Amino acid sequence: MKGTQLGEFEELVLLTIALLFDDAYSVAVVETLGEKLERPMSLGAVHRTMQRLEEKGMVSSRFGHATAERGGRSKRLFTVTLAGEQALQEMRRIRNELWAGIPKTAWSGL
Amino acid sequence: MKNKPPRWAEWLVERLTAPYQRDEILGDLSELFQKRGFRYGYSKARLFYLLDVLLLMHPRLWRSKSRSLAYANYPQLTHYQHPSPLVMLSNYFKIALRKLHRNKAYALINVVSLGLGIACAILIFTLVKYHLSFDTFHADKDRIFRVYTELHDNKTRYNPGVPNPMGDALRQGFTAFEKVGRIAFLEKRVVEVSPNKKFTEDIAFADPEFLEIAHFPLEQGNPKTALLERNTALITDRVAKKYFGTDDPIGKIVHIDDSLVVRITGILRNLPANTDIRPEMYIPFGNLKDHTPWMVEKDWWFSVSDDMQCYVRLKPGVTAAAVDNTVLPAVSSKYYDEKMAKYFRFKLQPLADVHFNPNLKGYTEKKNLWAFGLIGLFLIITTCVNFVNLSTAQALGRSKEIGVRKVMGSQRGALFWQFMTETALITGMATLVAFGLAYLALPVVNQLFEINLTLNPFNDVYLITFLPVLLLLVIFISGSYPGLILARFQPVMALKGKLSQRQLGGFSLRKGLVVTQFAISQLLIIGTLVIASQLRYSQQADMGFEKDAVVMLPIPDNKKSKINTLSAQFSELPGVESSTFFDTAPAAEDVGNTGIQFDSRTESEKFSISIKAADDRFVPTFEIPMVAGRNLNPSDTIREYIVNESAVKALQLKSNQDVLGKRAVINGRPGTIVGVMKDFHYRSFHLGIEPLCITTRSENYMNCAVKVNLGNLPATLAGLEKSWSALYPSSIFTYQFLDEEIERFYKLDTMMLRLIQAFAGIAIFIGCLGLYGLIAFMAEQKTKEIGVRKVLGASVPSILWLFCKEFVRLLLIAFVLAAPLAWWVMNGWLNNFVYRIELGAGIFALAIVITVGIAALTVGYRSMKAALVNPIKSLRSE
């Protein structure tokens, strides 16, 4: 991991960005995450997280097209970088290892 | 407005968000709003919007882009659609500097002309402030007044002095006064520190209360006993250093005019520059009777001398009007009989008025100061006009820049402020130049006004507030109009280069500005010419007596024997033609006035007559023509008078002969009128010739005039000094030529002339700079036109005329405006003189010739250059 940690919310946002692939921008992330988690998301929180992710180099951004409903303002589109993908893979591996390591009796004993 | 997010919230986010993410966030918010509005209705969406805005509040929102992001692949341009003002300012500065660098001549003209204008404004401001600050440093200055005298006969005369018992009278009988201080001013007394160390000093005899009224603190010595003990003196620190160097001055003995010996008991702090009370040596009032007994002789209520003054401080709550209306009339009626009480009236003059009341020997009138300020304002306007002119002309040259800026999204406001920044930059540089100029000019100004101004913006609150105000004013007056013009450009037209002078607008305004500028210059030129010719007239006109080659000497001691000795010794000198003794010169500022009772008439005459005391050689020495009768008899005891023609007229006599041999009581002394002189100017040309009489009276003689042969002047002067010094060993020899003394009557006028000359010069110079800039620009614009004209056969003069006709026309319009105004102002000024020149057409013609000449010189060189260009060169390049 070499110093870059992913927080839980960060991981979720990063995953959502990967999921949305070509249309990953803040509003889409807010909506998708909102639906999945079944709780309203604040734009501010998502925005800041995406900023942090970009600073960590896990996503890159470019400017997309402006639409009328945005009042003619362009959106910023995010793509997961190689570093981001590796971080996600790493997280998944660690989780899988942990899952695999849980003894069966741990669950049924209760 | 149903489906729009709340404007104020949007505005708030726009303000707060860092520029690089502003668009994105606003877009997100608005997209969310639209989606939610579609789904849940707009009022709910609006609530969500506000919630989102609230949750956006986080330092990340306004923090500038973090460093790691700076490397990210951000498209740069779009981030700065609403750049922060500071960033833009540095861009403006950069562009402005480049512009100035590229157009050095333009920059130089602007900086120099603005600099000149601002320098004048700074100097004028300092000067006006200096005069307004006179005597404002005294404690309780609002309660301090000077008592002055009004003498009411057929006209009212004013005298800043009072009869000498006034001080005591006010002190004893009246309760309105907190302090009453008499002070007697004596100018140019000889102070002897040691036999070979003598100084001429203005001294004053004052009551101890005077120093409590006036705020002149003691640095050494006891303020409680100062001026109480006779034969003591207070001197200022400066004088102490002059007399005694580094020695302790306290206890030192000095002699004053042979008649008084005083001991220094205190040192006053140096007098501030802004006080009209100039003596630097104070002696107890009681000593005055030892020094100048006539000033205090027998408590005389019937004599008023300028030099005997009385300052008072009223008790708090007492108004000056109350004192004027009750207390001072009571003084008059208590000490005079009914008739004289009408004649002698006393009033209070506020301390703040002392410097400004010309009736009471004030230095200058306030209206002069305002006139002065107005000239300063004129100059500033001229310079601003220059700037506006040049920069609107230049505006065409930058149409491409403006066009590009507009296409890139510059708003009008931004372009306007860009131009204002440029103006501010130029003005800033001009201010530095102005300070340099003001510092250079300050010694000259100080010398001209005989004052001691200093210029230090860092310890002068007024100047430091005045400067920014002035700068803002200049920046706005000169920057706003061209700024508006620039900001108004249509980008398409500007980029196509299709803007012409006419479309720029303001060509007629520019013409108007040039007219204003030249009207101001011409006004000042006419003023200069009028004042100069009036002064030349005053100084060269025949005064009615001989004033050339006459040396004037003071007579410190007028004992008959001394005068006779001096006269005998002078007549032996080879260069001396004749000499005469008298009280005041044939033309003098101060002439005594008195009443006259003629012949057997029972009543005194209604008019007052000026009186001079002079010996029998006065008339021949000054070559005053006698029109009837004979000159005075040398005797001092047989009272004889000679009068001038005006006196005969005032006595309503038909012929000059009628007055001869008649008895007259003048100044209370009966005598016989033996001769009539032709009228001569015995005062300055400001005043008319009024009745005058001359009589012999040696105890009044204070001056001696020696008519010398100009052939060997230095030797003659040395001879005069030798005899004079031998006779008056304790005095200091000084002399002056009569014509120079007469010139000094017009000192104030000469000062004004110098000033207006300077201002006219500056105004013309600034105007010419502007004109040069305009013509240079015009020449550039018309390169093609001139080329085509030349190809078609136009001659050089006709092309020159193309340039000149416009300016000649403007000059003429300016003249039409300036001439009546100048006539009105200068006629007012000439009315100060009884003997004056008439405002002829010549002066006005000369003024216009001068301006046209100067303008032609300015325009000529540049337009000549343009006219001589080979048309091949100007037409080849397309």
Image: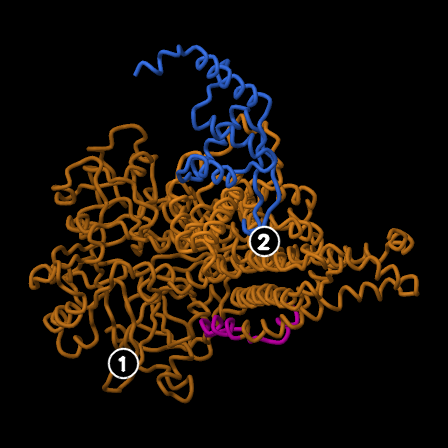
Chain colours: A blue, B orange
- The mark total stands at 2
Residue type beneath disc 2: Gln
The image shows residue B766 at horizontal and vertical percentages of 61, 56
Residue at the far front in the pictured view: A108
Q: Is residue B342 magenta?
A: no
Upstream in sequence: badge 2 or badge 1: 2
Observer-nearest residue: B789 or B202? Answer: B789
Q: Residue at x 65, y 67 (%)?
A: B511
Q: Locate residue B7 relative to residue B878 in the image: left or right.
A: left
Q: Which mark is residue B597?
A: 1
| Vertical relation: B808 (above or below) B187 | below
| Vertical relation: B349 (above or below) B712 | below
Circle 1 chain: B
| Vertical relation: A106 (above or below) B15 | above
Please tell me if label 2 and label 1 are on a single chain.
yes
Which of the 4 image quadrants contains residue B632?
Answer: bottom left
In the image, the segment drawn in magenta is: B824-847
Mark 1 lies on a secondary structure that is: strand
Q: Residues within 10 Å of mark 1 (few under 14, many from 20)?
A: many
Observer-nearest residue: B832 or B104? Answer: B104
Residue underneath mark 2: B411
Q: Is residue B569 visible?
A: no
Q: Residues within 10 Å of mark 2 (few under 14, many from 20)?
A: few
